[in-house]
């Protein structure tokens, strides 16, 4: 006769229930501990927004601040580049002014040398061949143009007041010429003054016409001195400059 399997007693059933219940509680606690540890290790924050649970990442917040710092550094680099460009422009301007000053000092020394040699010739009657050469060079200097230096003669309370005469020679008002540091522009103004003031030769109509066109375009560009630079917006001024520079200046003598 087969032996029947004994059914568990009520006490045994209660123990099984307790074990099962205990296992579930333990699993919940373990899961809570694991989640808590994961949140702490990853620096995550559990928050509720409108009743929903969201996990926030502090690292993400850190990255946001990092991008802000990068943006500020980029802005600083842009400002540094602008300052460097500004300093380079000032350095170039000072270099041009120094060049003009050196040339002016050399030219002025020729004029002063001529003054002394003329005194020897006219008053002391002991002029030499060297003096005659100095006088000749000084006369050429006096009759030549120097837009930048001559423009300075119109500054101050005791300055010259015949600015219309200056414009006849150089084509531009002296107050605007003193701001010019571009050697090529100063040179073209000096060429015009030399042709205009020449006592023995007459300038060609084409030369005066092209000079007038150059001045008009140069003034229209607000005296932009970068017209000979590659990529300049003042290409028409550059064309007028080269056209004037290659133009015949004096009429053929007949």
Image (cartoon, rainbow, N blue to C red):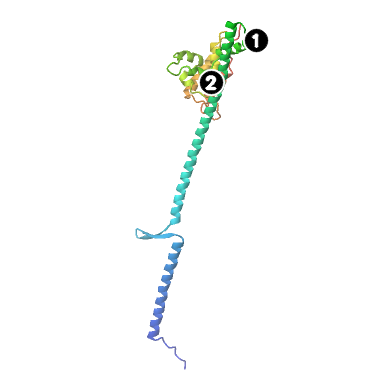
Q: Residue furthest toward the bottom? A: 1
* Residue of label 2: 186
Element under disc 1: helix
User: Residue 55, position in %: x, y?
Assistant: 41, 59
Q: How many marks?
A: 2
Q: Residue furthest toward the left? A: 50
User: Counting other residues with Cα less than 10 Å from the Cα at mark 1, is it few (<14), some (14-19), or many (20 or more)?
Assistant: few
Q: Is residue 239 visible to the viewer in this orientation of the structure? A: no
Residue ID at (57%, 8%): 119
Task: Work out which quarter of the rendered image holds the C terminus and state it.
Answer: top right
Q: Is residue 120 visible to the viewer in this orientation of the structure? A: yes
Q: Nearer the viewer, residue 31 or 151?
A: 151
**Location of residue 133 with respect to 105 vertically, above or below:** above
Q: Closer to us: mark 2 or mark 1?
A: 1
* Residue of label 1: 129
Q: Nearer the viewer, residue 241 or 70?
A: 70
User: Residue 73, position in %: x, y?
Assistant: 48, 44
User: Residue 128, position in %: x, y?
Assistant: 64, 9
User: Counting other residues with Cα less than 10 Å from the Cα at mark 2, is it few (<14), some (14-19), or many (20 or more)?
Assistant: some
Residue ID at (65%, 10%): 129
Give the mark nearer the N terminus: 2 vs 1.
1
**Location of residue 28 with respect to 11 vertically, above or below:** above
Residue 71, label in figure: none
Quadrant position of residue 22: bottom left
Q: CA distance from mark 2 to mark 1?
A: 33 Å
Element under disc 2: helix
Residue ID at (45%, 67%): 34
């Amino acid at each position: 006769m087969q032996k029947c399997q004994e059914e568990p007693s009520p006490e045994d059933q209660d123990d099984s229930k307790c074990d099962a219940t205990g296992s579930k509680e333990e699993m919940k606690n373990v899961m809570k501990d694991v989640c808590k540890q994961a949140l702490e290790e990853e620096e995550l924050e559990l928050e509720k927004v409108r009743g929903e649970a969201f996990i926030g990442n502090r690292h993400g917040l850190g990255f946001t601040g990092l991008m802000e710092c990068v943006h500020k550094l980029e802005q600083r680099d842009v400002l540094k580049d602008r300052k460097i460009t500004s300093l380079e422009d000032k350095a170039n301007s000072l270099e041009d002014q120094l060049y003009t000053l050196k040339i002016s000092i050399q030219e002025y020394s020729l004029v002063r040398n001529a003054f002394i040699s003329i005194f020897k010739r006219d008053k002391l009657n002991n002029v030499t061949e060297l003096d005659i050469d100095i006088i000749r060079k000084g006369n050429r200097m006096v009759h030549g143009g120097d837009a930048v230096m001559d423009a300075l003669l119109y500054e101050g309370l005791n300055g010259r007041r015949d600015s219309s005469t200056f414009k006849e020679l150089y084509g531009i008002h002296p107050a605007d010429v003193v701001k010019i540091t571009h050697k090529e522009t100063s040179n073209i103004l000096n060429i015009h003054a030399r042709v205009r003031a020449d006592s023995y030769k007459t300038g060609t109509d084409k030369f005066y016409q092209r000079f007038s066109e150059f001045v008009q375009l140069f003034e229209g560009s607000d005296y932009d001195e970068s017209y000979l630079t590659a990529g300049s917006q003042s290409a028409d001024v550059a064309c007028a400059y080269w056209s004037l520079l290659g133009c015949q200046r004096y009429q053929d003598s007949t």
